[in-house]
Image: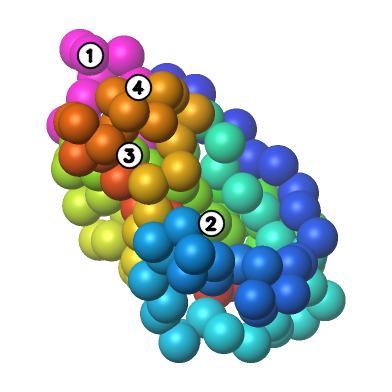
Amino acid sequence: GMLAVRGRKGKREDERFDECNGGMRNTEFTQETGNGRYGEISHVIVMFPWRRSNLGSQLTRTALDFCKERGFSRLSVAVSSPQTAAISMFQKLGFIQTISHHSTHVNRWFSKLARINVVELEKTI
């Protein structure tokens, strides 16, 4: 398996929750904590034979420790809505959904027809 974390500088609240994109606000994360720096999970991959073996959870816990050591205030991740197992795993680890929107990297019409949303989750460290 593999997980990648990028360091980010915090955004203003109105940039983080863009309701023009169909985003839905979760007020629990409306104020920045700490120094405004946070980690963002950009990739998570677990090979098929190793799925459902807690490897994704172990990688995520390692990422949380990594971010804590570097003084990041939170860890965020964006997951497409069909990846229900990944969303469930992050929620079990204490991540809370902050926004859901339709802005994906795939063709806009395809994502609309397939009803694919991007679910963004965060966990305060």
Image position of 32 (left or right of 65): right
Q: CA distance from mark 3 to mark 4?
A: 16 Å
Q: Check the picture and name the quadrant holding the C terminus.
A: bottom right
Query: In this rendering, is residue 34 above or below 8?
Result: below
Instruction: Verify CB contact (< 8 Å) between mark 1 and mark 2.
Output: no
Mark 2 Cα shell of 10 Å, populated few (<14), some (14-19), many (≥20): many
Q: CA distance from mark 1 to mark 2?
A: 24 Å
Q: Check the picture and name the quadrant holding the N terminus.
A: top left
Q: CA distance from mark 4 to mark 1?
A: 6 Å
Task: List the residue tagged with mark 4.
Answer: 46
Instruction: Verify CB contact (< 8 Å) between mark 1 and mark 3.
Output: no
The residue at the point 61 percent across, 49 percent down is: 40
Tell me which label, 1 or 2, sits earlier in the chain. 1
Task: List the residue tagged with mark 1.
Answer: 48
Query: In this rendering, is residue 25 above or below 88?
Result: below
Which amino acid type corresponds to the residue marked 3 in the rendered image?
Ser
The residue at the point 42 percent across, 77 percent down is: 25
Tell me which label, 4 or 2, sits earlier in the chain. 4
Q: CA distance from mark 2 to mark 3?
A: 14 Å
Q: Verify whether residue 54 appears in magenta.
A: yes
